[in-house]
Image (tube, coloured by chain):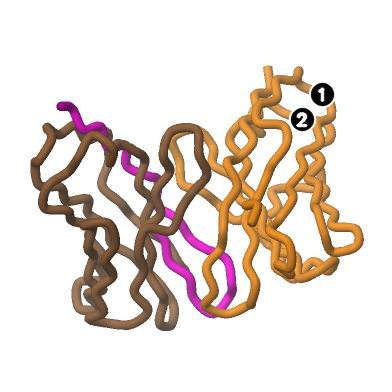
Amino acid sequence: EAGVTQFPSHSVIEKGQTVTLRCDPISGHDNLYWYRRVMGKEIKFLLHFVKESKQDESGMPNNRFLAERTGGTYSTLKVQPAELEDSGVYFCASSQELRGSEQYFGPGTRLTVT
Amino acid sequence: GNSVTQMEGPVTLSEEAFLTINCTYTATGYPSLFWYVQYPGEGLQLLLKATKADDKGSNKGFEATYRKETTSFHLEKGSVQVSDSAVYFCALITGANNLFFGTGTRLTVIP
């Protein structure tokens, strides 16, 4: 069974540009999460999808971030326009059931904004 | 609110040394506690977990006990190996389904 995959693994963009990150969860997992780790700090929750619906987006930092999960399969996270402080590693995770089930993480996308 | 404080790194140990990585938490309600590990070039993997007070999670020689009285979940291993070199994250989850993580501790084990 394939794990959670993320694309790209690394992205370098200039301030003001747009970047789209993609996450493919484990097949059959209804729950999909985005997290972010800014350099040297804790990994922070961004948002949670159940199928195609946003269950919780309380961690989204501002309206420059837009997450979608069309059809309840893969998800994209777009940053537009990117700022320097958006640099970090963006992790995606998926889980099968809601409460108490393990979240399986992807390898992350390292975003560098220059 | 919910938060996790974990031991600052990096930690460098010789092979077969004893490892402790401290983790304390603040939480509303009754959290479940986790240790995740990230090996170089890989995603986060669940290492072990404990869902209630006094539970002990264990895996691959690592152990951690859920201590409600001290709000702690320290990670221990009696004899580390080079292959244990990784970044270790302590985390909790409460009624909402999102994980709260600590800052991570990088462990390097030298032969």
**Left-right relation of A96 to B15:** right
> Which segment is the magenta one?
B91-111
The foreground one among A46 and B28 is A46
Q: Earlier in the sequence, mark 2 or mark 1?
A: 1
Residue in the image at 46% along x and 46% along y: A42
Q: Could you tell me which secondary element the residue under label 2 belongs to?
A: loop
- Reading the image, the residue beneath label 1 is A16
Question: Which residue shows up at 81% across the image and 47% down it?
Answer: A76
In percent of width and height, residue A21 lies at 76, 39
Up-down relation of residue B70 to residue A86 (above or below): below
Tell me, by letter, which chain the rendering colours brown. Answer: B
Disc assigned to residue A87? none
Query: Does residue A24 lie above or below B51 as drawn?
Result: above
Quadrant where the N terminus of chain A sits is: bottom right
Please give left or right for residue A10 compared with residue A41 in the image: right
Q: Which mark is residue A82?
A: 2
Q: Nearer the viewer, residue A76 or A30?
A: A30
Q: Residue at x 83, y 24 (%)?
A: A17
Residue A31 rendering spot, x and y as whole percentages: 70, 67
